[in-house]
Amino acid sequence: MSLEPQELEDLKSKIGREPTSTELQIVAAEWSEHCSYKSSKKHLKMLPMTGPLVISEKGYDSGVLDVGDGYVITAHIESHNHPSAVEPYGGAATGVGGVIRDILSAGTRPIAIFDGLRFGDIEKDQQARWLFKNAVTGIADYGNCLGIPTIGGEVEFDECYSNYALVDVAAIGFGKKENLIKNHANKGDLVVLMGGSTGRDGIGGSQFASDSLESEDRSAVQVPDPFIEKLVIEAILEARNHNLINALKDLGGGGLSCAVSETADTLGIG
């Protein structure tokens, strides 16, 4: 459980009772650093958020740039450090899957992948060499299965990254401005859940990604399935073309507890 003692007290105060075990797991996911950016938000707010091409209105799962003639470019980046340090192939591969879903959630087609990687000294450190080889292979394999090329990236090696890895993955998408999809639903909307069959892999992944890496927890790393994601990409883009989607949200590390609440957070009904 990644909740601090003060956070537990705050939760009890807000709901006026002891939380159930299910409620504890939901809040632990939603309040994790991975999902809430509770410690890094103040730093992220210092980054520029406006520009001549930026569509800065809220409600998109990706950054959106208006490139003219009715077209947009979407961009998203995220880290998958903890999972990649434990299971580098699956951790890096599912990192690609995550940024691709964020591009798709804006109603645009993913067209390219980038990565920024940091590892220990691979000439001296066998663990660093293993992490490097498998993380790079995971990124390449996942993109290849989706038919999306990795067109840029950079990597550095230093002893300060020994026994760990920094795996940042980015993606860009392309589409029509009129086809952009926001992530905020309306009251009465039908909720449709799409994706692969649910297993026990990845459970607690958002909390695991926010904790210090003191022990290996391979079960917290989701098993990659690019072939299902490829089907989901094409199905969603076809549904978008028929104006069947009102709101779209990536089902990420926090699972349904985060995806549904984030989609409905402007409605004031939960």
Image: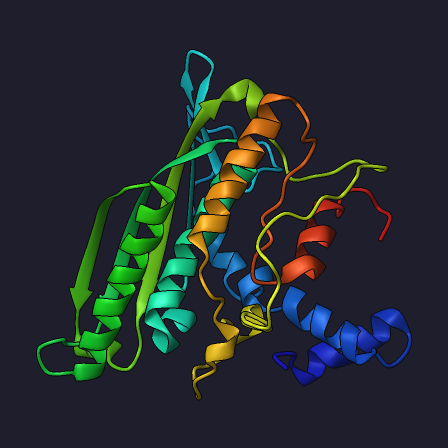
Would residue 258 be found to the left or right of residue 93 on screen? Answer: right
Residue at position x 61%, y 79% from top? Answer: 2
Quadrant position of residue 67:
top left
Residue 130, above or below 176:
below
Q: Nearer the viewer, residue 201 or 247?
A: 201
Where is residue 35 drawn, in percent x and y?
Answer: 58, 61
Q: How is the image coloured?
A: rainbow
**Quadrant housing the N terminus:** bottom right
Give x and y (percent) for residue 214.
Answer: 44, 88
Name the residue at the top extreme: 69
Residue at 62%, 37% (x, y): give it.
59
56 on left or right of 191: left
Of the pair 67 and 126, the residue shown nearer to us: 126
Q: Compared with residue 29, is residue 110 higher up or lower down, i.e. above or below?
A: above
Residue 212 percent coordinates (x, y): 46, 81
Q: Residue furthest left?
A: 123
Q: In the image as oriented, which residue stretches furthest toward the right?
A: 16
Q: Residue at x 50, y 49 (%)?
A: 228
Q: How many marks?
A: 0
Looking at the image, residue 8 sits to the left or right of residue 251; the answer is: right
Residue 242, percent from left and from top = 63, 21
Residue 46 in view of the camera:
no
> Is residue 152 among what the camera can see?
yes
**Depth check: 197 or 8 in front?**
197
Q: Residue furthest bottom?
A: 215
In the rendered image, the vertical position of residue 7 relative to residue 39, given as above or below: below
Tell me if 9 is positioned left or right of 207 in this view.
right
Residue at the spot 70% in from the left edge and 77% down from the top edge: 7
Asked if 73 appears above or below 121 in the picture, the reply is: above
Res. 27 image quadrant:
bottom right
